[in-house]
Image: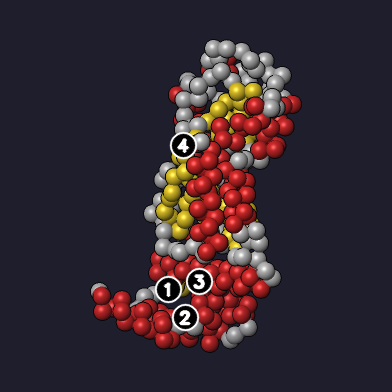
């Protein structure tokens, strides 16, 4: 096994060409060698030969042929994933060089979940800019379902927010920053605003603003609702847009579930009101997720350190 691994690595280092990987990724995208070859401007026989050479060099079958084209085998899917990562890293390197030539001190691409976007992330950016005023920072907001593929493909350097409890755990490493909890919040004019001793019976008649189905919090909410005699909300709005959620809560008699880190400032300012109801789910760690086998750039390492500093500052 060790000899086979060494043999394949030696072939990859001496014979593998980026154009072969480009073709491999294109075939995976098109599901057809002819269309992939056309997209890359090469002949189909040449493309077929390149795929065959890859299969010989890596000693595995990369595609199964069907009457509709080709389908990647498990080996093909793995090599395509690594090929995409290589191209993402090349793109990142080119972008970082471009940033440096324009006077920027590096570049970092951060994916953010709702729990990190309100205060942790802005504070970390402020800390980073104190040390690296010319760093280029790109922020992508979304759910884990959207951001994790970008992290694994190399398009995103790190994802900040609620740490996923089960999915992607074998492909990422996590660094916990702090524990967060979920609050039930309403607008200032809601009938339950300011009421003490609120129970779920008081809450049941109202509609909800809920996180999307693919989130961990939504699964916890649905599990809780099932335990409440198969409760189904009268109105249910799914949204990850905090600005939209806040406006809906202020204008309608809805109930929202939000991370305390996100809504604390709006509660202090009176824009939202925390219900006097202890949410029996949703407590969990907020942190940073990174690819398990990847080293961050200097700018990426500096930003991760800034996240830890920001998390420490919020505890003081």
Residue that numbered label 1 is attached to: 62
Where is residue 144? Give x, y as percent. Answer: 53, 48
Of the 4 image quadrants, the one containing the N terminus is bottom left
**Numbered disc in front, either 3 or 2:** 3
In the image, 147: left or right of 253? left
Q: Residue at x 72, y 19 (%)?
A: 189
Sooner in the amino-acid sequence: mark 3 or mark 1: 1
Let me know if residue 52 appears in the view.
no
**Numbered disc in front, either 2 or 4:** 4
The reply to whether the C-beta atoms of the residues labelled 1 and 2 are less than 8 Å apart is yes
Mark 3, secondary structure of its residue: helix
**Compared to 224, does 146 lie above or below?**
below
The reply to whether the C-beta atoms of the residues labelled 3 and 2 are less than 8 Å apart is no
Residue that numbered label 2 is attached to: 51
Q: Residue at x 43, y 67 (%)?
A: 78
Residue that numbered label 3 is attached to: 86
Measured Cα–Cα span from mark 1 to mark 4: 44 Å
The mark found on residue 179 in the picture is: 4
């Amino acid at each position: 096994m060790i000899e086979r691994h060494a043999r394949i690595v030696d072939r990859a280092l001496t014979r593998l060409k980026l154009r072969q990987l480009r073709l491999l990724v294109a075939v995976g995208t098109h599901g057809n060698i002819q269309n992939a070859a056309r997209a890359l401007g090469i002949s189909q026989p040449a493309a077929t030969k390149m795929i065959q050479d890859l299969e010989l060099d890596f000693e595995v079958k990369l595609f199964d042929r069907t009457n509709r084209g080709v389908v990647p085998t498990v080996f093909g899917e793995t090599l395509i994933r690594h090929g995409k990562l290589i191209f993402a890293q090349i793109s990142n390197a080119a972008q970082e060089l471009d940033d440096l030539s324009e006077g920027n001190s590096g570049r970092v691409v951060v994916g953010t979940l709702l729990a990190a976007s309100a205060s942790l992330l802005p504070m970390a950016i402020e800390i980073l800019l104190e040390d690296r005023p010319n760093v280029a920072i790109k922020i992508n907001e979304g759910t884990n379902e959207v951001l994790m593929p970008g992290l694994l493909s190399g398009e995103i350097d790190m994802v900040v927010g609620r740490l996923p409890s089960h999915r992607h755990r074998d492909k990422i490493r996590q660094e916990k920053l702090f524990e967060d909890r979920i609050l039930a919040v309403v607008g200032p004019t809601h009938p339950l605003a300011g009421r003490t001793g609120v129970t779920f019976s008081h809450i049941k008649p109202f509609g909800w603003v809920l996180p999307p189905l693919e989130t961990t919090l939504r699964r916890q909410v649905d599990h809780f609702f099932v335990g409440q005699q198969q409760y189904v909300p009268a109105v249910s709005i799914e949204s990850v847009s905090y600005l939209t959620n806040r406006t809906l809560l202020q204008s309608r008699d809805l109930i929202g579930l939000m991370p305390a880190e996100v809504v604390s400032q709006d509660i202090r300012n009176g824009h939202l009101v925390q219900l006097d109801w202890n949410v029996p789910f949703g407590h969990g760690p907020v942190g940073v997720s990174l690819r398990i086998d990847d080293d961050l750039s200097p700018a990426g390492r500096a930003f991760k350190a800034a996240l830890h500093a920001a998390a420490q500052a919020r505890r003081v």
